[in-house]
Amino acid sequence: MKSAVVAVAFLAGIGLLAGCQPAAQKAAAPKEKKVEPKKAEKKKKKSATERFRTALANQDKWQKACSNPNQLVPEGIDVETFRKEMLATVKFPPGGVLGKDVKRGEKLFGDPKKGGRSRRGNCYACHCGDPQILACGNIGPSLRGYGKRGIDPKDTYIKIYNSWAVVPCSVMPRLGYHGVLTPEEIADIVAYMHDPNSPLNK
Amino acid sequence: MGKRKLLLSALTGGVILGAVATAQEQVPSHLQELLELGMHPGHAYVDEGRETFNTLKGPNGKTCASCHGEDGAKLEGAYAKMPRYYTDIDRVADLDLRILSCMTKYMGFDPKDKKFRKEFDKWNGRYRVPLATFVASLSNGMEINVKLDDPQEKELYKKGEELWFMRVGARDFSCGICHTVLTGKRIRLQGLPDPVKAKVYTHWPAYRFGSDKMWTMEDRVRSCFKAYFLYEKKWDEKKDWVKKPPPYSDWVIALELYMKYAANGGVVEVPGLLR
Amino acid sequence: MARIGRAIVRVPKRISKGQVFKIQMVITHPMETGRRKDKKTGQPIPAHYIDLVEFFFNDQKITTLRTGPAISKNPYFAVKMKATESGTLIIRYKDNKGGKWEKSVKVSVS
């Protein structure tokens, strides 16, 4: 049993190395923008170049509109249509925009733990909030006292899910739209931000 | 007690925030002294690079110095003109790629040798980074003068500019969002420089003191892409994550060319020092 | 740390006989105090610091620095000396974990 696992792992390793080869050769070869010859085979691992090219090709039409040198004004789509289209993509969780788990909301808001999916919110990269947390960015407005500003939680939800529905081509990432945060997670963050007892609002 | 603690932490926070600005990334005062003395760990890499340059023999018995002169005499000022088109590889190359192609074409190293490639590519390996830092230092005091004469250079420059403003990935980032639109602001405690306006390329390759890392602009550009959250099919699938562009690829060199051209006229002061 | 024990030494180029000049030196070294804790494991990171730096000029010892963990990472040292002839400056330094290095620099005095 163990040897079978080892054999499989070994073969997988070889497959991986074989897959890496083309990338190494490509880097030394000239004009790598040319289309690679079709590899006639069963599932072969894609080269790093192909994967990166695919990743760039995933740019959606709204990102493309915001890729002009101005960066903050959409080109090719008028602002109102842009907002409407973005608003249409917002998905609400079944339990409503105010989540129940405020503690999870706090964790998603500020926990900068590296790796994997726990880096999702990372709000302190750009915003300040809880006054105890000094390592906060100044890109977005401070969110201290957010819950006391009389904002409708639904608007908070929409802003986090798809900030481009509020400000087209905004600097703020469209966390819900891209799946960086799930609707339930956003609901918990909204709850944390609106909870009068959270350190954010003290 | 709580109030005092808060005041103390606010003060330290203020000092930290005060030290973070832009330009050569204003480093904290204790590092500023090292920078002014011109004696920071980055210089150890220059020394190491000089040694490697003069003594490392490739499989065909040649050292870098065999062609380029002892202590790189013939390479003075070369870095100030790079990235540029090289006829022998028919590509626009930056420093890292040029060193790789030189070693494989003229020193006999095998480009297909995985062990060599691994040692070459890694950031703390003994070939690329010390050699790049040394060769870059040979242009110290000279003005950057990147020309766009060759058609491939012109095309790559356009591509670089396009890529700079291209918003893509699960965070809708582009280089321009952080480094043009948000220049001067901070992500947490890290100030954002504008490499284009501030001619940041004059002090790259640079040594980042806090993480003890000497890196070339190629390393830096590739590392930035990790923040983009690029993916193949869906961001949700970890196996779909595309973290960095491949090394020495046109995407990376295009961005380097775009930034270096913007630094034309700036005086090379290498190695730089970052916090 | 990637490169430990590399020394960068600066000696003035023009030195006249009998002039007091400064030798400047930076050594790449983590200078761990032994009190810092590893963030992941919670275990203290073992002490690793330079504990001896000796300067020799033309085989004559000119000074000894007995250093300790209170000195910060990548330490900078400056030593003043007087010379009446040209020669070789050799700096020998070691750390508490058995690392031993030597750096030699030519000094020209006119």
Image (cartoon, coloured by chain):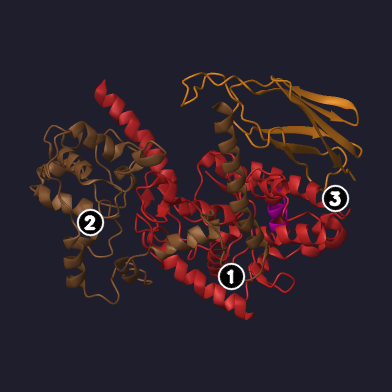
Amino acid under disc 1: Asn
Q: Nearer the viewer, mark 1 or mark 2?
A: 2
User: What residue do we see at 12% from left, 36% from top?
Assistant: A195
For the N terminus of chain A, the image quarter is top right
> Residue B264, which numbered label?
1
Label 2 residue SS: loop
**Residue B267 shows in the view:** yes
Amino acid under disc 3: Lys
Above or below residue B241? Residue C39 is: above
Report which residue position mark 2 lands on. A162
Q: Any idea which chain is the brown one in this picture?
A: A
Label 1 residue SS: loop
User: What residue do we see at 17% from left, 43% from top?
Assistant: A187
The one of A14 and A133 positioned closer to us in this rendering: A14
- The colour with which the image depicts chain C is orange
Residue B132 sits inside the magenta stretch: yes
Report which residue position mark 3 lands on. B57
**Residue C83 shows in the view:** no
Range shown magenta: B130-136
Q: CA distance from mark 2 to mark 3?
A: 57 Å
